[in-house]
Amino acid sequence: YIWPSPQLDALESLRFEQAFADFVQPCDLFSFDSQGANSRSGRSNAADWIRTAYHDMATHNVADGTGGMDASIRFDEEQARPENAGDGFQNTLLAILAQSNRYVSIADVLALGAVFAFDNWQVLGGPEIPFRGGRVDATEPNAPGVPEPQEDLNSHIASFARQGFTQAEMIGLVACGHTFGGVQHAPFPNIVPELNDPNNTQSVAHFDSTSVQFDNKVATEYISGTTQNPLIVGLNETTNSDKRIFASDGNATMRSFAQSPKLFSSTCAELMARMIDTVPKGVQLTEVITPLSVKPSGLDLVLAGNGLQFSGQVRFWNMTDDPARTVRLLWDDHSGGINNVTLRFSHVTSSSGGRNTAAWYTFNPADDVSFLSLDPEAGITTMRFAVGDKLEDQGGVGFATQDDVLFSTSSCFDADGNGGRWDIAVRNGVAPTRVYLEAQTRDNISRPIVLETDVPPPVPQGPTNATAPYAIWSVEVKGNFESFKTYNVGAEVGGVKATRIGQHSLSDFSPCA
Ligand code: HEM
């Protein structure tokens, strides 16, 4: 896709910049145990996240298009059902709900959690699950429908058919899920006894001998008869659902997985992608999110008195540090000028279990100067980057940069921290039908939403100064801790409503006179 695209940019950052993937590194990390990082609980965030994604999806009904990945699992009513026994769903939401935002739904982050749980294993031949965004969060619980271990084979075949999966796909999906984690004593005391093991304090009987790792041991141990999977060798035959499911085609599918780690991996990539892309009828998912090779990030542009202050970074994918490399930012302005500055190397990040690296360059010219100064008359229209002698301009279109509506540093906060005045700079010649502040918050069912506060145009007082590059629109705000709330600025120009560059709170500016 072409930058900027607010939704795809946000999905891309979350998928490729590691932010919450750190919850599944190391892979046996479990955040909800009193021993924390030294946990010997037998549990893992990674396993909880995969199971949560499956249980959210498993309510899908292909016939009427209801249910699916829509984060309905976040409702207490759904978590209280016997089919959703255990605290793994609550734990998952506690860890990752905060990652959702106006562009990335809670259902998207649940799907991404499952992707991350598999992601770290790619270096060892594990699958990369293609990730799309655009899921829509449910407004109420879905109808029940998650399979339970005591049900018979025909019920399971029917249940997976209702979810949209064939019998062979059911075997595959269960095997792919059950290469992680296991069955805990607390929610399933009839399947797993207390283990009294100081290295497995929550008494989890694991599905295979490598329970926090993606590999085909779930299949090899089953085929060789050495499996300890509690849903295969459990003393109570009734709850041996994996045994019935795995054997339901004469072991053909499981044998093929045992013979070929590659086939198991590619099958899991395909089935997991289908699982997380199973959404209620009418929901339109985005394209598969792939990393942008060049991505401007964290941009800010403010009017400061007589100058424009521009700051930000640019990320180059699959690039490591190289002191000999020169990176320049070139920008076009409104007066037809082309300007340029050499950017400074900032740092290198790594993601997906160390498989990808990205090099970041920052726009500020020196450590003690946090912005580039632009001429406000000329402004900025488009960026391009020169890496050595290679021009990065998105195939000629450049990186469009808006300078029409911005925060002004004349904004100020009240001494009590409970309000102040927002000054928004509107470029001369631009005629917005609306300018507004955007605050991101959540509704009463946790969905990220945006509240808008209108900023009125200035009331003309005497002759207007039509030669000033920007006019100031202002609004006074009041409320508890208002000075510390973060806002974006948005505007509607020519019928197009869009968020502009940068994010601020009043406390970034000066006290009001
Ligand atoms: C007939 C279908 C299935 C049944 C009856 C079933 C049953 C179970 C049960 C009883 C547990 C133990 C939960 C706990 O103690 O917290 C479990 C765990 C798990 N299941 Fe399934 N499952 C099924 C299908 C799937 C599928 C399709 C996936 C994902 C693709 C999946 C992923 C997981 C994972 C990752 C765990 C480990 C959770 C943890 O260790 O915290 N399951 N399953």
Image (tube, rainbow, N blue to C red):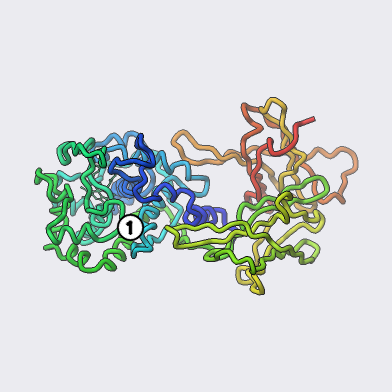
Q: Residue furthest top?
A: 416
Near-viewer residue (264 or 418): 264
Q: Position of residue 480 (x, y in %)?
A: 62, 26
User: Which class describes the residues within 10 Å of circle 1: few (<14), some (14-19), or many (20+)?
Assistant: many
Near-viewer residue (188 or 57): 188
Q: Is residue 478 visible?
A: yes
Q: Position of residue 415 (x, y in %)?
A: 72, 27
Left or right, 178 with reference to 113:
left
Q: Position of residue 110 (x, y in %)?
A: 39, 48
Q: Quadrant of residue 382?
A: bottom right
Name the residue carrying label 1: 272
Ligand 1 within 8 Å, label 1 CB: yes
Near-viewer residue (321 or 463): 321
Q: Residue at x 55, y 64 (%)?
A: 320
Near-viewer residue (59 or 304): 304
Q: Is residue 67 visible?
A: no
